[in-house]
Amino acid sequence: MRACEEELAKGVLEPMFTFMRAQTSKERLSIQTLDHYLLYRRSDVGQAYEKELLSAQNAHLEGGALCNAVEILAKEVRLDTESAKRVLWALVREWEVKHESMVYERSAREDCGSDILNYMKGLEFHMSGNEAWSKATKRYQEVEA
C-alpha cells in the first residue's frame, strides 16, 4: 500500500492501531451493559453473534472474550439469546425511525445545504448497505464448528 500511495497509507495506520488495540483490550472483559458495549464498539467492529461465540469458545483466553450485544443484552435483562436478538432488531428499527425524523427536521431548516443533505443520505446508504451486506456475506452467515 505504501508503494502505491504513501500518504494515504500513513493515514490508515492510526485507525488500524486503534482497531487492533480494541480487539485485545481488557475492557472487553468488563462490559456489562448495552450502553457500555455501544461506547466500546465505536472503536471496534463486532462480528455476528454465532461467530464470536464460537471464537470465544475456541480461541486463546486473551483474545477470546465474547463481547457482543446479543450476549450482553441477554445477561443484562435476563433474556435468552433468541429473545435478545429480537429485541436488538427492534431497537435498530427504532434507531432507523429516529434517524429519519432527525433528517426530516434538519432538512426543513433554511440553513440545510446540499452538503448536509448528501451527508445524511450517505449515512443512510452506509447503514443500510452494511446491514444488507452483513445478512448476505459468508463472513457473518457461515459458522464453522
Image (cartoon, rainbow, N blue to C red):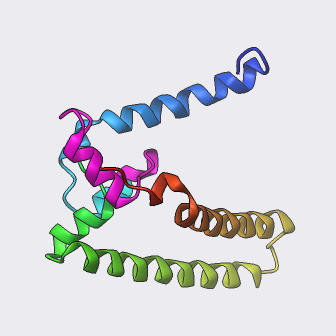
- The picture quadrant where one finds residue 107 is bottom right
**Side (left or right) of 98 relative to 20:** right
- The picture quadrant where one finds residue 115 is bottom right
Specify whether residue 67 is in view. Answer: no
Where is residue 74? Give x, y as percent: 21, 71
**Side (left or right) of 142 relative to 87:** right
**Quarter of the picture holding the N terminus:** top right
Q: Is residue 91 magenta?
A: no
Residue at (54, 34) in percent of width and height? 15
Where is residue 104? Give x, y as percent: 69, 84
Report the magenta residues as a range.
40-65
Q: In this view, does 140 lie above or below 26?
A: below
- The count of marks equals 0
Q: In this view, does 114 lie above or below 5?
A: below
Where is residue 131? Give x, y as percent: 56, 67
**Side (left or right) of 84 relative to 107:** left
Residue at (45, 37) in percent of width and height? 19
Residue farthest to the top? 3
Where is residue 122? Give x, y as percent: 73, 64
Q: Nearer the viewer, residue 41 or 74?
A: 74
Residue at (22, 53) in percent of width and height? 31
Residue farthest to the right? 114
Residue at (18, 77) in percent of width and height? 79
- The picture quadrant where one finds residue 20 is top left
Specify whether residue 99 is in view. Answer: yes
**Side (left or right) of 141 relative to 65:** right
